[in-house]
Image: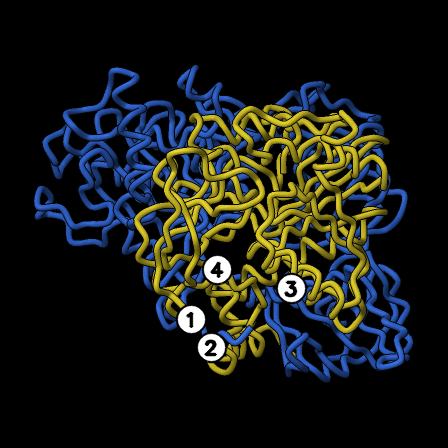
Amino acid sequence: MGVPVTGAGAVTGAMSLLRLTTAGSVDDGKSTLVGRLLRDTQSILADQLDAVSRATVARGGGIGDEPDLALLTDGLRAEREQGITIDVAYRYFATPTRKFVLADCPGHVQYTRNTVTGASTAELAVVLVDARNGVVEQTRRHLAVAAFLRVPHVVLAVNKMDLVDFDEPTFRRIEADFATAATSLGVPDVVSVPVSALHGDNVAFRSDHTPWYSGPTLLEHLEDVPTGREAVEEPMRFPVQLVIRPRTTNHPDYRGLSGRLASGVLTVGDDVVALPSGGRSTVTGIDTPDGPIPWATAGESVTVLVADELDAGRGEVLARPEQAPRVVTELDADLCWLADRPLRPGARVLVKHGTRTVRAIVTELTGRLDLHTLTHVGAPEALELNEIGGARLQLAEPLAVDDYATDRHTGGFLVIDASDGSTLAAGLVAKGP
Amino acid sequence: MTVTAMRSMAPSRMNGMRPAERDHLAALESEAVHIIREVVAEFDRPVLLFSGGKDSAVLLHLALRAFHPAPLPFGLLHVDTGHNFPEVIEFRDRLVSQLGLRLHVAKVQEWIDDGRLSERPDGTRNPLQTVPLLDSIAEHRFDAVFGGARRDEDRARAKERIVSLRDAFGGWDPRRQRPELWSLYNGRHTAGEHARVFPLSNWTELDVWNYIARREVSIPDIYYAHEREVFARDGMWLTAGEWGGPRRGEQIVTRTVRFRTVGDASCTGAVESTAVTLDQVVAEVTASRLTERGATRADDRLSEAAMEDRKREGYF
């Protein structure tokens, strides 16, 4: 090509990646906050802002000359026409040190389905509260979903501070109420920030209106939160995706197990066990297209070479023998039911866990989850759309699972309709015996 | 090794010795490779949409990495509008022959010639790609179609799943999308359905350019500044060519330009630029105040929902 190439990063430097989700009730100003984050990180370019300004005028709205930032995040025609948000949308913004992938979840339609989806991949959840209303029923629910899906970090954004004259006692009261709720749900360190998404106070820029607040702006906090640590510290799990066997003249005998390390650290020389089959071997190499590497950490896609003719294909999980997952044919789990027709005991389904899909029967519903207390009550006859409940599943073949509470990367699974293939539920493996 | 030992070791490894492997581009690369492998494992007949543009070049590069050192286990499909930039077609053919890949080409012109499609009054053929795409998917029985679309490109695309199911008509129904949880992709489908798969969903234009620089991904020369005979239409520089431009009254001039996107020549505009190296392109993209589609795609300026409407009909 004759084009000079130099290493990347000259402009952006080394950036980390943080996945986050937002949760707020209707009219808490969530879309405005997301729009504000995008705008104040210069992630909205001139043509997009022009389009929003035109749309603001066309709808006869806007405050002063400000474009309505909420309009930025309405993706679909029906959403703009009906003034609602239907589906999770993904937004991207960046600062010089971090790229953000934001799952923007609607506050009311298909509430559980969307927030559970957003929270499943998030390392941080921003929960919004209207400063005039404080912590309400919905806030507790947002917090409970984050706690239930084990989102590692939660931030409380007390929005519309401009409408309470940036009053410190108001903020402190909401902060304390939220901390109480968080503690009761088992959510560790919570950071609270007083903001006005509409005017930008304490979102990306420190506000002159809150001299009493010495904590970080929302964006500063998003930049500082540690990322990726949790998964690296968990036991090593390597779900095998495919066996790479080129059988070419250059690589006649090459046989590698390709996959993405779900959690932990994998090192050359590690003794490993393949589960559920139980075969053992030793890692002789970790291969990438750029050459061999001495170890891989959670999140990396690599190809693993092992010493023996280990019979480990797709569906097996490599683990260290002393930290192995449980191999089960009966599974207790919480199911977030996402389908229109209710779940009843006796249902025949598919369970997709890691790279393995097995047939299963839901033998029992053991309780409905009370999001107030995160405890199970009753033994329901059925689980309805957007309800969460405990269930026991009988599996046709064994799965190697972890408790969701100890490893959210290998403790989650999908429940799938065997006939039409639709996703029926998000499953979280309950604590084992 | 004990858990305690793991914990004390992991952070030093994570931060200490291979820092480049832990940054956002490494994370995006690993995510894309994981997606591509999942789809190859669970589908029978995947294919990769390859236009020769930068996003499809990055997608192909990632697919090659996913199966290294084995050859690519699927072929490429190019829906050719006939309104091409010759440099891009040369690039496509050179890459395909160098790598020994299979390439299917669906020519919009053939659909027009036998009456299955008719030319639009405005002369653009971008929307005409949908029918040849769906016909080719049906003819070759492709059940998974990799595309280089990114969620940051358009407001409708921001709601797209990574693995997105299509019915026999290729239609996208945003209300019936499957929830996508953790990194578990549900690609189960019935006969006649297929999945569109977007491994670059979480990438931005800048990520793509930084990745091209890091991995030295080959792209066509027209992404770098060059002298070109162009004419102005709708505030963009279009290239004179067989597709029909310029119209009467549109003046041909020579400008130093580059392309930010590559599509149908009748609606893909060039931007004035002096960026002749990759670093200069990255710097220019970083500083740009316009999105790539806003700057260079006439078809997306038509309405607020132009992309959504095309996607509902089965477009990429």
- Who is closer to the viewer here, A173 or A298? A298
Q: Are marks 2 and 1 in contact (CB under 8 Å)?
A: yes
Number of the label disc, if any, that sits on residue B191: none
Q: CB under 8 Å between callouts 1 and 4?
A: no
Q: Residues within 10 Å of mark 4 (few under 14, many from 20)?
A: many
Q: Amino acid at mark 1?
A: Thr
Circle 1 chain? B
Residue B277 - label:
1
- Tell me the CA gap for discs 1 and 3: 20 Å
Q: Are marks 1 and 3 in contact (CB under 8 Å)?
A: no
Chain at numbered mark 3? B
Where on the picture, by quarter, is residue A296? Answer: bottom right
Q: Residues within 10 Å of mark 3 (few under 14, many from 20)?
A: some
Q: Residue at x 28, y 23 (%)?
A: A56
Give residue A365's position: percent from left, percent from top: 73, 28
Q: What amino acid type should be assigned to the residue bearing mark 2?
A: Pro
Say which residue label 4 marks. B223
